[in-house]
Image (cartoon, rainbow, N blue to C red):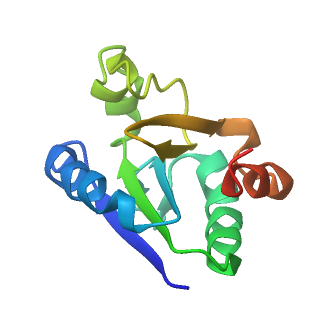
Amino acid sequence: MPLKVLDATIATFNGVFEKFRAEAPQNKANFILFLADIDPSTNLSWCPDCVRAEPVIYKKMEESAEDIALLRAYVGDRPTWRTPQHPWRVDPSFNLKGVPTLIRWENDATKGRLEDSEAHLAHKIDSLLIGN
């Protein structure tokens, strides 16, 4: 089954999130992956945990037989992310502490999550994919 991917930045998030929410009932599972932005000088994320986790997360989702939607939300550059008032740090729906953070989104709420140091662990991603 195809993996449906939407991308959003802080500036575009609200509109993209509304589309994601509207389409959520059509999918078997819906996920939001909060990531650090790409550093233009290296063409890689400035966040080492994101660099490590992304390929594992994508591989696991692509291997799934289910219809999965993934909203990739980019938190900004390092100084933007470090701001204590970052919109996703203070939003009670997300309450981000670190990146990457992978959230299973069901019934308009967080059903499960993996944060920074565990987001690359295949067995934990598998558990989140099946909703445990």
**92 left or right of 3?**
left
65 relative to 29, above or below:
below
Q: Which of 22 and 58 is in front in this view?
A: 22
Residue 50 in sight here: yes
| Residue pictured at 29% horizontal, 51% vertical | 21
89 relative to 114, above or below:
above
| Residue pictured at 62% horizontal, 78% vertical | 62
The picture places residue 32, in percent across and down from the top left corner, at 45, 50
Q: Which of 90 and 67 is in front in this view?
A: 67
**96 left or right of 64?**
left
The picture places residue 131, in percent across and down from the top left corner, at 68, 49
| Residue pictured at 81% horizontal, 58% vertical | 122
The picture places residue 58, in percent across and down from the top left corner, at 61, 70
Picture quarter with the C terminus: top right
**12 left or right of 42?**
left
Residue at the bottom extreme? 1
Residue 39 in sight here: no
**On the image, which quarter does residue 11 sit in?**
top left
